[in-house]
Protein backbone atom coordinates (compact mmCIF):
# COMPACT_ATOMS: atom_id res chain seq x y z
CA UNK A 1 0.00 0.00 0.00
CA UNK A 2 1.36 3.39 -1.00
CA UNK A 3 1.41 5.97 1.83
CA UNK A 4 -0.54 9.10 0.90
CA UNK A 5 1.01 12.44 0.04
CA UNK A 6 -0.65 15.48 1.59
CA UNK A 7 -1.69 18.32 -0.73
CA UNK A 8 -2.68 21.61 0.86
CA UNK A 9 -2.55 24.12 -2.02
CA UNK A 10 -5.52 24.79 -4.30
CA UNK A 11 -3.00 25.66 -7.05
CA UNK A 12 -1.42 22.21 -7.01
CA UNK A 13 -1.17 21.01 -10.66
CA UNK A 14 -2.88 17.70 -9.89
CA UNK A 15 -5.85 19.43 -8.26
CA UNK A 16 -6.17 21.82 -11.19
CA UNK A 17 -6.34 18.83 -13.52
CA UNK A 18 -8.88 17.05 -11.35
CA UNK A 19 -11.12 20.12 -11.24
CA UNK A 20 -11.26 20.02 -15.03
CA UNK A 21 -12.06 16.31 -15.07
CA UNK A 22 -14.77 16.74 -12.43
CA UNK A 23 -16.42 19.83 -13.88
CA UNK A 24 -15.78 19.92 -17.64
CA UNK A 25 -17.95 17.53 -19.66
CA UNK A 26 -15.33 16.80 -22.32
CA UNK A 27 -12.01 17.19 -20.46
CA UNK A 28 -11.62 13.40 -20.44
CA UNK A 29 -11.11 13.46 -24.20
CA UNK A 30 -7.92 15.52 -23.84
CA UNK A 31 -6.66 13.92 -20.65
CA UNK A 32 -7.58 10.32 -21.40
CA UNK A 33 -8.76 9.88 -17.81
CA UNK A 34 -11.97 10.19 -15.81
CA UNK A 35 -12.74 11.29 -12.26
CA UNK A 36 -14.81 8.85 -10.21
CA UNK A 37 -16.09 10.32 -6.97
CA UNK A 38 -17.57 8.38 -4.10
CA UNK A 39 -17.47 4.89 -2.67
CA UNK A 40 -20.02 3.41 -5.11
CA UNK A 41 -18.24 4.38 -8.33
CA UNK A 42 -14.84 3.52 -6.92
CA UNK A 43 -16.02 0.07 -5.86
CA UNK A 44 -17.78 -0.47 -9.20
CA UNK A 45 -14.46 0.12 -10.93
CA UNK A 46 -12.66 -2.36 -8.69
CA UNK A 47 -15.42 -4.94 -9.08
CA UNK A 48 -14.75 -5.03 -12.83
CA UNK A 49 -11.08 -5.76 -12.23
CA UNK A 50 -9.77 -2.27 -13.01
CA UNK A 51 -7.23 -0.28 -11.04
CA UNK A 52 -7.14 3.51 -10.71
CA UNK A 53 -4.00 5.47 -11.43
CA UNK A 54 -4.62 7.89 -8.54
CA UNK A 55 -6.76 7.90 -5.41
CA UNK A 56 -7.66 11.12 -3.64
CA UNK A 57 -8.90 11.01 -0.05
CA UNK A 58 -9.97 13.58 2.45
CA UNK A 59 -8.08 13.23 5.70
CA UNK A 60 -11.13 11.76 7.40
CA UNK A 61 -11.87 9.62 4.35
CA UNK A 62 -8.42 8.07 4.57
CA UNK A 63 -8.74 7.37 8.28
CA UNK A 64 -12.02 5.49 7.78
CA UNK A 65 -11.35 3.88 4.38
CA UNK A 66 -11.25 0.09 4.26
CA UNK A 67 -8.06 -1.61 3.17
CA UNK A 68 -9.19 -2.40 -0.37
CA UNK A 69 -9.74 1.27 -1.19
CA UNK A 70 -6.46 2.30 0.41
CA UNK A 71 -4.47 -0.19 -1.64
CA UNK A 72 -6.34 0.19 -4.94
CA UNK A 73 -4.36 2.98 -6.62
CA UNK A 74 -0.80 3.30 -7.77
CA UNK A 75 -0.59 6.64 -5.94
CA UNK A 76 -2.59 8.01 -2.96
CA UNK A 77 -3.08 11.66 -2.02
CA UNK A 78 -4.72 13.37 0.94
CA UNK A 79 -6.48 16.74 0.79
CA UNK A 80 -8.39 18.83 3.33
CA UNK A 81 -12.18 18.74 3.01
CA UNK A 82 -12.26 22.23 1.53
CA UNK A 83 -10.04 21.20 -1.38
CA UNK A 84 -12.10 18.05 -2.07
CA UNK A 85 -15.24 20.20 -2.05
CA UNK A 86 -13.57 22.55 -4.55
CA UNK A 87 -13.06 19.62 -6.95
CA UNK A 88 -16.33 17.84 -6.35
CA UNK A 89 -19.31 17.98 -8.66
CA UNK A 90 -21.58 16.71 -5.87
CA UNK A 91 -23.72 18.76 -3.51
CA UNK A 92 -21.88 17.12 -0.64
CA UNK A 93 -18.37 15.97 -1.50
CA UNK A 94 -17.28 12.39 -0.91
CA UNK A 95 -14.30 11.24 1.10
CA UNK A 96 -12.66 9.40 -1.80
CA UNK A 97 -12.26 9.73 -5.55
CA UNK A 98 -10.35 7.75 -8.15
CA UNK A 99 -8.69 8.82 -11.39
CA UNK A 100 -8.93 6.06 -13.97
CA UNK A 101 -7.14 5.92 -17.30
CA UNK A 102 -9.61 5.18 -20.07
CA UNK A 103 -9.06 2.13 -22.28
CA UNK A 104 -7.98 2.72 -25.89
CA UNK A 105 -10.75 3.65 -28.30
CA UNK A 106 -12.11 0.73 -30.32
CA UNK A 107 -14.46 0.52 -33.31
CA UNK A 108 -17.96 -0.98 -33.00
CA UNK A 109 -17.92 -4.77 -32.77
CA UNK A 110 -19.84 -6.90 -35.22
CA UNK A 111 -22.54 -9.29 -33.97
CA UNK A 112 -22.45 -7.93 -30.40
CA UNK A 113 -25.75 -6.66 -28.96
CA UNK A 114 -25.73 -2.87 -29.15
CA UNK A 115 -27.57 0.26 -28.12
CA UNK A 116 -27.23 3.18 -30.51
CA UNK A 117 -27.79 6.72 -29.21
CA UNK A 118 -28.77 9.28 -31.81
CA UNK A 119 -28.16 12.82 -30.50
CA UNK A 120 -29.50 12.23 -26.96
CA UNK A 121 -28.81 15.38 -24.98
CA UNK A 122 -29.76 14.73 -21.36
CA UNK A 123 -26.94 13.29 -19.25
CA UNK A 124 -29.38 11.60 -16.87
CA UNK A 125 -31.11 9.83 -19.75
CA UNK A 126 -27.82 8.69 -21.24
CA UNK A 127 -26.53 7.36 -17.91
CA UNK A 128 -29.80 5.56 -17.22
CA UNK A 129 -29.70 3.91 -20.65
CA UNK A 130 -26.15 2.72 -19.99
CA UNK A 131 -27.36 1.10 -16.77
CA UNK A 132 -30.15 -0.67 -18.64
CA UNK A 133 -27.78 -1.80 -21.40
CA UNK A 134 -25.40 -3.34 -18.88
CA UNK A 135 -28.18 -4.90 -16.83
CA UNK A 136 -29.85 -6.55 -19.81
CA UNK A 137 -26.77 -8.00 -21.49
CA UNK A 138 -25.91 -5.54 -24.24
CA UNK A 139 -22.17 -5.38 -24.73
CA UNK A 140 -21.71 -2.02 -26.40
CA UNK A 141 -23.20 1.45 -26.62
CA UNK A 142 -22.55 3.56 -29.70
CA UNK A 143 -23.02 7.33 -29.59
CA UNK A 144 -23.65 9.20 -32.82
CA UNK A 145 -22.27 12.70 -33.18
CA UNK A 146 -24.35 15.16 -31.19
CA UNK A 147 -24.95 12.79 -28.25
CA UNK A 148 -23.98 13.86 -24.73
CA UNK A 149 -20.39 12.94 -23.91
CA UNK A 150 -20.48 9.39 -22.57
CA UNK A 151 -17.71 9.88 -20.01
CA UNK A 152 -18.81 13.33 -18.84
CA UNK A 153 -19.06 13.62 -15.05
CA UNK A 154 -22.88 13.80 -15.08
CA UNK A 155 -23.26 10.76 -17.33
CA UNK A 156 -20.75 8.79 -15.26
CA UNK A 157 -22.65 9.57 -12.06
CA UNK A 158 -25.98 8.66 -13.66
CA UNK A 159 -24.48 5.42 -15.00
CA UNK A 160 -23.67 4.25 -11.46
CA UNK A 161 -20.82 2.01 -12.63
CA UNK A 162 -22.43 0.62 -15.80
CA UNK A 163 -19.67 2.25 -17.88
CA UNK A 164 -17.17 -0.36 -16.72
CA UNK A 165 -19.31 -3.23 -18.05
CA UNK A 166 -19.66 -1.84 -21.57
CA UNK A 167 -17.66 -1.04 -24.67
CA UNK A 168 -18.42 2.62 -25.39
CA UNK A 169 -17.84 4.09 -28.84
CA UNK A 170 -18.29 7.82 -29.51
CA UNK A 171 -18.43 9.85 -32.71
CA UNK A 172 -20.16 7.11 -34.68
CA UNK A 173 -21.60 7.96 -38.12
CA UNK A 174 -24.75 6.34 -39.54
CA UNK A 175 -22.68 4.52 -42.17
CA UNK A 176 -20.71 2.80 -39.39
CA UNK A 177 -23.80 0.88 -38.29
CA UNK A 178 -23.64 -1.41 -41.33
CA UNK A 179 -20.54 -2.98 -39.81
CA UNK A 180 -22.53 -4.17 -36.80
CA UNK A 181 -24.14 -6.86 -38.97
CA UNK A 182 -27.23 -6.63 -36.74
CA UNK A 183 -30.90 -5.84 -37.32
CA UNK A 184 -31.62 -2.25 -36.33
CA UNK A 185 -34.78 -1.91 -34.22
CA UNK A 186 -36.43 1.44 -33.65
CA UNK A 187 -39.44 2.53 -31.65
CA UNK A 188 -42.38 4.62 -32.75
CA UNK A 189 -45.65 5.72 -31.19
CA UNK A 190 -47.58 5.20 -34.42
CA UNK A 191 -46.07 2.33 -36.45
CA UNK A 192 -44.76 -1.18 -36.03
CA UNK A 193 -45.85 -4.22 -34.04
CA UNK A 194 -46.52 -3.91 -30.35
CA UNK A 195 -43.42 -4.84 -28.37
CA UNK A 196 -45.19 -7.36 -26.14
CA UNK A 197 -46.49 -9.22 -29.21
CA UNK A 198 -43.20 -9.28 -31.11
CA UNK A 199 -40.51 -11.95 -31.27
CA UNK A 200 -37.25 -10.05 -31.07
CA UNK A 201 -34.02 -11.12 -32.79
CA UNK A 202 -30.80 -11.64 -30.88
CA UNK A 203 -28.28 -10.15 -31.12
CA UNK A 204 -29.74 -6.85 -32.28
CA UNK A 205 -29.17 -3.11 -32.08
CA UNK A 206 -31.76 -0.79 -30.54
CA UNK A 207 -31.61 2.75 -31.93
CA UNK A 208 -32.79 5.48 -29.55
CA UNK A 209 -33.32 9.01 -30.78
CA UNK A 210 -33.17 12.59 -29.55
CA UNK A 211 -35.52 13.38 -26.66
CA UNK A 212 -37.61 15.80 -28.72
CA UNK A 213 -36.93 14.96 -32.36
CA UNK A 214 -36.62 11.19 -32.17
CA UNK A 215 -34.45 9.17 -34.53
CA UNK A 216 -32.98 11.18 -37.41
CA UNK A 217 -34.32 10.72 -40.92
CA UNK A 218 -31.14 9.11 -42.23
CA UNK A 219 -31.30 6.45 -39.53
CA UNK A 220 -35.03 5.91 -40.02
CA UNK A 221 -34.31 4.69 -43.52
CA UNK A 222 -31.99 2.03 -42.11
CA UNK A 223 -34.53 0.48 -39.74
CA UNK A 224 -35.04 -3.27 -40.09
CA UNK A 225 -37.98 -3.26 -37.71
CA UNK A 226 -40.26 -0.77 -35.98
CA UNK A 227 -41.98 -1.54 -32.68
CA UNK A 228 -44.24 0.42 -30.37
CA UNK A 229 -44.84 0.16 -26.65
CA UNK A 230 -48.43 -0.28 -25.53
CA UNK A 231 -49.55 2.66 -23.39
CA UNK A 232 -53.07 1.93 -22.18
CA UNK A 233 -52.98 5.05 -20.00
CA UNK A 234 -53.04 7.18 -23.11
CA UNK A 235 -49.82 9.20 -22.78
CA UNK A 236 -48.42 10.47 -26.05
CA UNK A 237 -44.89 9.18 -25.45
CA UNK A 238 -42.46 7.86 -22.88
CA UNK A 239 -39.22 9.33 -21.63
CA UNK A 240 -36.45 7.84 -23.78
CA UNK A 241 -34.69 6.24 -20.81
CA UNK A 242 -37.93 4.59 -19.66
CA UNK A 243 -38.65 3.36 -23.19
CA UNK A 244 -35.10 2.02 -23.45
CA UNK A 245 -35.44 0.04 -20.22
CA UNK A 246 -38.68 -1.54 -21.45
CA UNK A 247 -37.23 -2.44 -24.85
CA UNK A 248 -33.91 -3.78 -23.58
CA UNK A 249 -35.68 -5.86 -20.94
CA UNK A 250 -37.92 -7.30 -23.66
CA UNK A 251 -34.80 -8.29 -25.61
CA UNK A 252 -33.30 -9.92 -22.54
CA UNK A 253 -36.40 -11.98 -21.77
CA UNK A 254 -36.87 -12.93 -25.43
CA UNK A 255 -33.25 -14.06 -25.54
CA UNK A 256 -33.64 -16.11 -22.37
CA UNK A 257 -36.76 -17.86 -23.69
CA UNK A 258 -35.06 -18.70 -26.98
CA UNK A 259 -31.94 -20.02 -25.27
CA UNK A 260 -29.69 -17.72 -27.33
Image (spheres, rainbow, N blue to C red):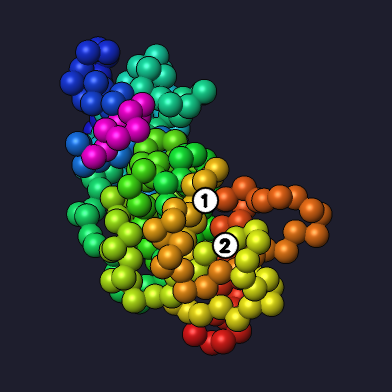
- In space, the residues marked 1 and 2 are separated at their CA atoms by 9 Å
| Residue depicted at x 23% and y 26% | 17
> Which residue is most to the bottom?
259
- Report helix, strand or loop for mark 2: strand
As drawn, 181 above or below 92: below
The answer to which quarter of the image holds residue 116 is bottom left
Residue located beneath label 2 in the image: 187
Picture coordinates of residue 65, whole percent (x, y): 42, 36
Pointer 2 local density, CA inside 10 Å: few below 14, some 14–19, many at least 20:
many
| SS majority, magenta | helix
Nearer the observer, 215 or 43? 215
Picture coordinates of residue 99, whole percent (x, y): 29, 38
Can the viewer see residue 98 in this picture?
Answer: no
| Residue depicted at x 40% and y 41% | 148
- Report helix, strand or loop for mark 1: loop
Nearer the observer, 11 or 71? 11
As drawn, 88 above or below 205: above
Picture coordinates of residue 211, whole percent (x, y): 54, 45
* Marks 1 and 2, the one that precedes in the sequence: 2
Q: Is 225 part of what is drawn in magenta?
A: no
The answer to which quarter of the image holds residue 27 is top left
Nearer the observer, 182 or 41? 182
Residue located beneath label 1 in the image: 214
Can the viewer see residue 12 in this picture?
Answer: yes
Q: Quick check: 104 left or right of 224?
A: left
Q: Quick check: 203 left or right of 255?
A: left
Q: Which residues are magenta?
A: 21-29
| Residue depicted at x 57% and y 50% | 240
Amino acid sequence: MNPPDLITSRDNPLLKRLRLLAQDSTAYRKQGQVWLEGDHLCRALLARGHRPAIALFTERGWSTAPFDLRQAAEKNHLVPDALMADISGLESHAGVGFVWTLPPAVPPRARVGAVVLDRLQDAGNVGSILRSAAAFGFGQVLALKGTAALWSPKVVRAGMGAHFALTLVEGVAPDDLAGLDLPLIMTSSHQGDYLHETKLPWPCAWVLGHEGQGVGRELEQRADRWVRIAQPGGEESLNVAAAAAICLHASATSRAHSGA
